[in-house]
């Protein structure tokens, strides 16, 4: 059963890890997938081909999600090319981890700009086509760190906590128009980024999780498919924790 048949979805930060898994699952479920990329044209075309090989329609657009005007132009272009936008997944994010006493203003500003301002930019831009269609699902990628904080990640935690507050506000504003807004808070997800960590450290992390394993990008992607689909039609303003029970 294809849960997203004929839907047009935008996924930011889809070149690897969680974002790439979301794009792949969306294609499997019949969505047309639009993704953004910041620099490498070559990688974007390779991803287009990879997604198309799964039998779907995929298109990459060069756009900086953290740039307000660029986000507006992107949505205008996608609507011109595909007719509408049904699903927006704000997944793009970066880390600049360091203790607060060592954190530079630049490290703070960069994380807030890329992780939080981009969510404002794209959500604001996508409202018009969603209002016109009288439906839409907005899914914002937060983190367990945004819920409970983490030493050495004050900038990242602030950006991800901000996403949760923003998500609830948008849900309250747009609910009457049949536009839903939810957040996902992944826990310890094993990606290319965590593969570089020491195996002993990773195993210690796994042992603290009730399900005794790290999550996979597919675990997050499956939750995203659910929130994007009509199966979650009566769910809005929520934060879905995909963390193996790490936070209860």
Image (cartoon, rainbow, N blue to C red):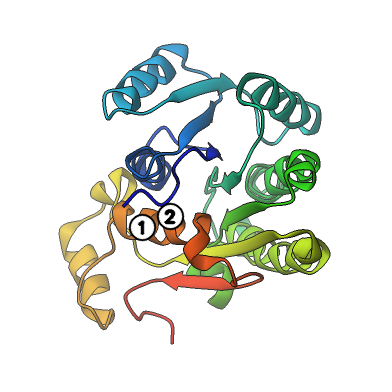
Q: Name above or below for residue 152 compared with residue 71.
A: below
Q: Could you tell me if residue 151 is visible in this image?
A: no
Q: Secondary structure at mark 1?
A: helix
The residue positioned 65% from the left and 58% from the top of the image is 159
Q: Secondary structure at mark 2?
A: helix
Question: What percent of the width, then of the height, locates residue 120?
Answer: 75, 48
Question: What percent of the width, then of the height, locates residue 5?
Answer: 44, 42
Q: Is residue 62 left or right of residue 221?
A: right
Residue furthest to the top: 42
Q: Name above or below for residue 190 compared with residue 27.
A: below
Q: Nearer the viewer, residue 12 or 53?
A: 53
- Graded by Cα atoms within 10 Å as few (under 14), some (14 to 19) or many (20 or more), the crowding at tag 1 reads some
Q: Which mark is residue 211?
A: none
Q: Could you tell me if residue 176 is visible in this image?
A: yes
The residue positioned 37% from the left and 37% from the top of the image is 27
Tell me how far mark 2 sits from mark 1, CA to CA. Answer: 5 Å
Q: Nearer the viewer, residue 143 or 55?
A: 55
Q: Name above or below for residue 156 compared with residue 123.
A: below
Whether tag 2 and tag 1 are in contact, CB under 8 A, the answer is: yes
Residue furthest to the bottom: 248
Q: Which residue is mark 1?
A: 222
State which quadrant residue 238 falls in: bottom right
Q: Name above or below for residue 238 compared with residue 5.
A: below
Question: What percent of the width, then of the height, locates residue 113?
Answer: 71, 43
Q: Which residue is mark 2?
A: 225
Q: Is residue 218 left or right of residue 75?
A: left
Question: What percent of the width, then of the height, locates residue 154?
Answer: 61, 64
- Graded by Cα atoms within 10 Å as few (under 14), some (14 to 19) or many (20 or more), the crowding at tag 2 reads many
The residue positioned 79% from the left and 60% from the top of the image is 174
Count of picture labels = 2
Q: Is residue 243 left or right of residue 77?
A: left
């Amino acid at each position: 059963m294809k849960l997203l048949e004929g839907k047009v979805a935008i996924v930011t930060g889809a070149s690897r890890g969680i974002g790439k898994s979301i794009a792949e699952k969306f294609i499997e479920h019949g969505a047309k997938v639009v993704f953004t990329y910041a620099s490498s044209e070559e990688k974007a075309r390779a991803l287009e081909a990879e997604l198309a090989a799964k039998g779907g329609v995929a298109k990459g657009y060069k756009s900086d999600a953290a740039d307000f005007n660029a986000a507006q132009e992107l949505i205008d272009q996608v609507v011109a090319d595909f007719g509408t936008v049904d699903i927006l997944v704000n997944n793009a994010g970066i880390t600049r981890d360091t203790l607060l006493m060592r954190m530079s203003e630049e490290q703070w500003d960069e994380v807030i700009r890329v992780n939080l301002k981009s969510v404002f930019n794209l959500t604001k831009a996508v409202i018009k086509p969603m209002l016109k269609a009288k439906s839409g699902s907005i899914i914002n990628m937060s983190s367990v760190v945004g819920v409970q904080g983490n030493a050495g990640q004050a900038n990242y935690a602030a950006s991800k906590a901000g996403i949760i507050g923003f998500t609830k506000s948008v849900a309250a504003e747009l609910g009457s128009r049949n536009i839903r807004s939810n957040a996902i808070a992944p826990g310890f997800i094993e990606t290319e980024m965590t593969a570089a960590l020491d195996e002993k450290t990773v195993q210690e992390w796994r042992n603290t999780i009730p399900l005794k394993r790290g999550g996979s990008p597919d675990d997050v992607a499956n939750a995203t498919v659910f929130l994007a689909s009509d199966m979650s039609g009566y769910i809005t303003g929520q934060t879905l924790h995909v963390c193996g029970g790490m936070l209860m």
